[in-house]
Image (cartoon, grey):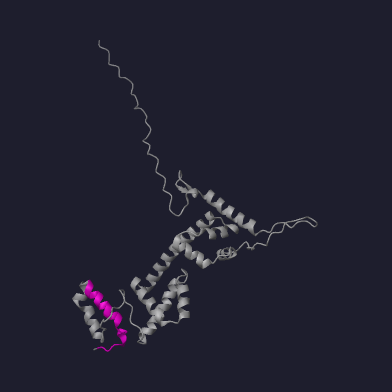
């Protein structure tokens, strides 16, 4: 009698580890972060190094602003010429003036050259700010000013209704307001907290001037070219707005806008 065949025991397939993804490449160091404050392995700012740098800077300022101990009675002492004292909360301009420099001239020099002359570095180092600290501060300030300027321009253009309208509004204001008011408007429009309100204030002044026949309406487009003929009736403006050419041809639309900018407030024109 034939024997039944023996079935071999089932063998589980070998266990293999799941495929491992290659390690992700860490982010590159951004331009605003100095290399000494960047952790290349982690691809992140080295917060500890940055904090230590600020701590060292504050310690240095404290050392410079803390008077040395007075000698005891009867002790000999060499008394140097009294240095310019800076309070612990001294601002940047105070530090620059204490170094015998002019803040405006120093800022202009940095803006034009991206560096300072040797004499300026030496004077600033004499009051406790070595060239590396000075350069780092000026670079951060320049980046902040650039970002601030972009923010101001974006806010002002949005409030005015476009880049060209803003340019035309400012050109009108330059001729319509007093030098004292112009200085105040300039300071306020460049303050991000006041930019929008300042543009709105100028728009309100301009609207009053338009109603009084002392200004033209603001249209998005370049300033009015010489010799542009203004519209003299409301019917002319309506006809132009309804014409197929002005609606479909960019050049015709631009010419129409030029005539609008050269015209008085349409509400003040006769109907026909």
Nearest to the observer: residue 235 or residue 231: 231
Nearest to the observer: residue 34 or residue 134: 134
Q: Residue at x 41, y 75 (%)?
A: 199
Residues rendered magenta in the picture: 250-271
- Residue 188 in picture, x, y percent from top left: 47, 73
Q: Is residue 258 left or right of residue 18?
A: left
Q: Residue at x 58, y 55 (%)?
A: 57
Residue 248, above or below 133: below
The furthest residue to the right: 74
The furthest residue to the top: 1
Nearest to the observer: residue 139 or residue 121: 121
Residue 22, above or below 95: above
Q: In the image, is residue 252 part of the stretch drawn in magenta?
A: yes
Name the quadrant of the C terminus. bottom left
The furthest residue to the left: 244
Name the quadrant of the N terminus. top left
Q: Judge whether residue 251 can be spotted in this image.
A: yes
Q: How many labels sit on residues?
A: 0
- Residue 114 in picture, x, y percent from top left: 45, 59
Q: Residue at x 50, y 59 (%)?
A: 117
Residue 143, above or below 50: below
Q: In the image, is residue 192 part of the stretch drawn in magenta?
A: no
- Residue 44 in picture, x, y percent from top left: 46, 48
Nearest to the observer: residue 241 or residue 225: 225
Q: Judge whether residue 144 can be spotted in this image.
A: no
Majority SS type along the magenta span = helix
Q: Is residue 174 left or right of residue 247?
A: right
Quadrant housing residue 219? bottom left
- Residue 209 in picture, x, y percent from top left: 38, 84
Quadrant housing residue 66? bottom right
């Amino acid at each position: 009698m034939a024997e039944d065949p023996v079935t071999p025991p089932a063998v589980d397939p070998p266990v293999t580890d799941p495929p491992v993804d290659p390690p992700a490449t860490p982010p590159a160091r951004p331009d605003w972060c100095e290399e000494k404050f960047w952790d290349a392995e982690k691809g992140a700012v080295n917060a500890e190094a940055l904090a230590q740098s600020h701590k060292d800077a504050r310690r240095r300022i404290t050392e410079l602003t803390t008077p040395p101990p007075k000698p005891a009675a009867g002790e000999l002492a060499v008394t140097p010429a009294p240095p310019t004292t800076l309070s612990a909360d001294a601002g940047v301009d105070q530090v620059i003036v204490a170094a015998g420099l002019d803040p405006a001239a120093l800022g202009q020099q940095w803006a034009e050259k991206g560096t300072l002359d040797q004499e300026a570095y030496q004077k600033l180092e004499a009051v406790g700010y070595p060239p590396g600290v000075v350069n780092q501060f000026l670079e951060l300030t320049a980046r902040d000013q650039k970002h601030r300027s972009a923010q101001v321009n974006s806010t002002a253009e949005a409030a005015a209704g476009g880049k060209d309208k803003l340019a035309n509004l400012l050109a009108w204001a330059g001729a319509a307001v007093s030098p004292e008011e112009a200085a105040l408007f300039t300071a306020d429009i460049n303050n991000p907290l006041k930019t929008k309100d300042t543009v709105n204030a100028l728009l309100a002044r301009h609207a009053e001037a338009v109603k009084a026949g002392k200004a033209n309406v603001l249209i998005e487009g370049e300033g009015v070219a010489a010799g542009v003929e203004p519209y003299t009736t409301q019917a002319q403006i309506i006809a132009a707005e309804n014409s197929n050419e002005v609606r479909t041809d960019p050049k015709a639309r631009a010419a129409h806008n030029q005539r609008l900018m050269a015209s008085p407030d349409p509400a003040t024109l006769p109907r026909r």
